[in-house]
Amino acid sequence: MQQQVSSWGRLRRVPHDVARPAFLDELRAAASAEGGPRLCFGMGRSYGDVCLNEGGRLIVTDRLDRIMAFDRERGVLRAEAGLTLDRLLRVTVPQGWFAPVVPGTKFVTLGGAVANDVHGKNHEQVGTFGAHVNAIGLARSSGEVLTLSPQENTELFAATIGGLGLTGVILWVELRLTAIRSAMFDTETLAIDDLAGFFRLAEESRDWPYTVAWIDCLAKGGATGRGLFTRGRPAEGGGLDVHRAPRLAAPLDAPGFLLNAHTIGLFNAAYRRRPFVLGARRVHYDPFLFPLDAVADWNRLYGRRGFFQHQSAVPMAGAFETVRELLELTAESGEGSFLLVLKLFGDEPSPGVLSFPLPGATLALDFPNKGESTRRLLDGMADVVLAAGGRLYPAKDATMSGAAFRAGYPDWRKVEAQRDPKIMSDFWRRVTAEAA
């Protein structure tokens, strides 16, 4: 069936031949079917074009969401690749188990979490999602069905973790869960006066497993980097209640004129000074780990033209200077957003060849699409990141050049060597075309 499909950034809608298999045998058949290039599509929460395959086939996996096995004693779960973290947590939390790593939204599939090797607020202590995967079931277009693990088909396993869905169709994922005593987190939020304050608090908070900072993207001069630093750890008590469905939704696309430096500045001031934000609190995992999920379709708040996200990782050596330069570029442009997140990555290695995190700092922020001025800003930020020896995050990217990708991921050819010849994405075409 022909459909126009976009990613979460809503920057472009492009035609695809869409298939929605309901069973694993149908998914295997879709992987090996005759025809042109194909690509799996989970919840579409990637911001750019890693989940798009313009003019080709998309295999949508949202109906493949069954739990195949759950060892409640050991906390090992095997499920079809279309199972979302939302549904997984509804099953595992009442049993005293939690996903070991979660990104900023629970509306991602297990297959997507593997393909992008997602990270969370606890990266410093536990690494990426892929570090907790026992095994993967993979179907190739040749008709071959393989089991991948650190002990079996190891090169293909490494290429599939963070491999952007290019090595084959992920059928199922086996994951090691984390034991919890409650669904609550003990948290503490502290004010940050400037960027030095962030790095100081981050260093002081290394015994807290979860850390993240919200930064006022328009602050300048001595106030550059001001914001709020939040740290948390799983609570010992509070019950094992699961999250609720979103109560709010963006009913329509916001008018573009609402997103300007003045309105963003007003919001940031109000957000930073809102009552009862500072201090210690015990909160449910949902608002702590997934704050944006409280508003369904929040991407519509950026208007019909959509939005870009810049997320970069830079080495700790020089991280202060690099992050400061990125913040200064953003403040000077006036094109910032309500959401700017800063945290540190640890040195826990990922099994994936193309995994994004590296030991250092990571900065993520959204930009409403204002055309060429926004693209120039993103290109300028990319230049700063690359000069510092950093890299950009493919799951969030829509503008990365081929040169920037290859500089940030020098081992990319290892994935190309393992890529299924019938699988392709718009992102991979874009960043590898010059090197073909």
Image (cartoon, helix red, strand yellow):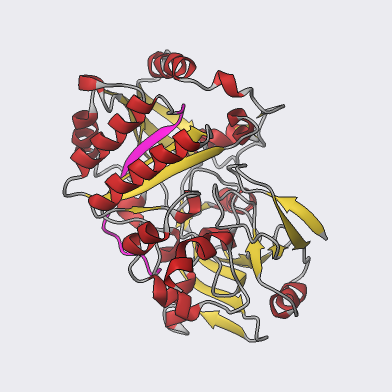
Question: Is residue 436 magenta-colored?
Answer: no
Q: Residue at x 77, y 74 (%)?
A: 26
Residue 384 % position (x, y) = 28, 45
- Can the viewer see residue 284? no
- Can the viewer see residue 144? yes
In the image as oriented, which residue stretches furthest toward the right? 1
Which quadrant is the N terminus positioned in? bottom right
Magenta stretch: dominant secondary structure? loop
Residue 94, relative to residue 327: is it above or below?
Answer: below
Q: Residue at x 78, y 54 (%)?
A: 3
Residue 41 % position (x, y) = 65, 59
Asked whether 410 or 46 is in front, the reply is 410
Quadrant for residue 304, please give it: top right
Asked whether 49 or 333 is in front, the reply is 333
Residue 138 % position (x, y) = 59, 77
Quadrant for residue 297, please give it: top right
Residue 186 % position (x, y) = 39, 34
Quadrant for residue 203, please give it: top left
Task: Tell me if 151 is positioned left or right of 135 in this view.
Answer: left
Q: Which residues are magenta?
A: 337-352
Question: Is residue 347 magenta-colored?
Answer: yes
Q: Residue at x 57, y 68 (%)?
A: 173
Residue 414, relative to residue 410: is it above or below?
Answer: below
Asked whether 234 or 157 is in front, the reply is 157
Residue 239, relative to residue 5: is it above or below?
Answer: above
